[in-house]
Amino acid sequence: MIVTRNRRDVVLRCLEKLFSADASPGQVLVVDNGSTDGTADAIRKAFPAVGVCGMGRNVGPAGGFAVGMDLASRLDPDWLFALDDDCFVERDTLACLLDTASRAPEAVAVLAPLTAHGGKRNVGYRWRNRPVPLTDNGQQWPEMVDVDMVTFTGALIRSSAVKSLGLPRADYFTMCWEWEYFLRLRRSGLRISVVPRASVHHDTLGSPPRASTPSRGYYQARNGLRLALDRGRPVEVLHWGMREVKLVGGILLFLDRKGTRIRLRLRGAVDAMRGRMGQRVSAGGSL
């Protein structure tokens, strides 16, 4: 399943790579998050076998993947393959993941490839707050390496885990929703593993410079605090606060629209404490 919004050419390339691979999913579903650039029609024309779920409005990546996982799990597959529209699989990506899945213990609920940014392969996630030292030569590492979380950039998710754990929280809209979902999965006792010999290219093609969008700071602050509060761990709330101080310092030193950015982060914190979730400000980006 793939979630997209207003990136017609990017998602078409994603699908082309997926269907050109050594192994491809039995069924493919694209959730179109209210695109206005003809994305849905282009997919139906180029890939008639692909199911397209048109949302009619932008529900964010959290809402899009929640809908996609709900629909896909009803087909009763063994595994769900979740892919951002700007992730491009290699020929053997899914074949490697499925091969590993055939030997994975039941406790392993998620298998994920390494992601490549600018040609450099990396994992970018941590195990109990320590970096996972995976290098470019994944063959020297074990077949599976446990981590605390991954992202939906080629994650292979066991369907039975989705049925027992539930869906991502659509009310996060964007930012931190993958953290919430996979930390919830880990807390239930299930395992998340990276498969070093599998990789995807995550080039963020067609994306605007969303990191500089003030509204993203709102969702980052709100959802990060809400996650810490819901997990009931004061130390995580403290860590959130310390990180916010650093981020605000960075805004004051390096970024434009300082007042807007800081006000939105403060508003996000207040909304988190009040439980005001969902889309509250314009996302300002393609998803």
Image (spheres, helix red, strand yellow):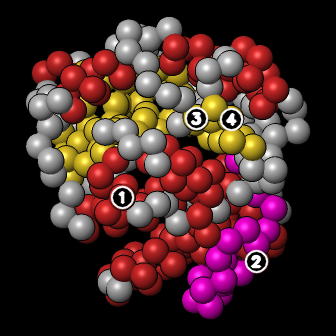
* Amino acid identity at mark 3: Leu
First along the sequence among labels 3 and 2 = 3
**Residue beneath label 1, please?**
163
* Residues at marks 2 and 4, CA–CA distance in whole angstroms: 38 Å
* Amino acid identity at mark 2: Arg
**Residue beneath label 3, please?**
29
Task: Give residue 128's quadrant in the image.
Answer: bottom left
Say which mark, if any, is on residue 263: 2
Q: Position of residue 194 (x, y in %)?
A: 26, 37
* Magenta stretch bounds: 265-287
* Residues at marks 3 and 1, CA–CA distance in whole angstroms: 18 Å
First along the sequence among labels 2 and 1 = 1
* Residues at marks 4 and 1, CA–CA distance in whole angstroms: 22 Å
**Residue beneath label 4, please?**
52
* Amino acid identity at mark 4: Val
In the displayed structure, does residue 219 sit left or right of residue 58? left
First along the sequence among labels 2 and 4 = 4
Q: Are marks 2 and 1 in contact (CB under 8 Å)?
A: no
Q: Are marks 3 and 4 in contact (CB under 8 Å)?
A: yes
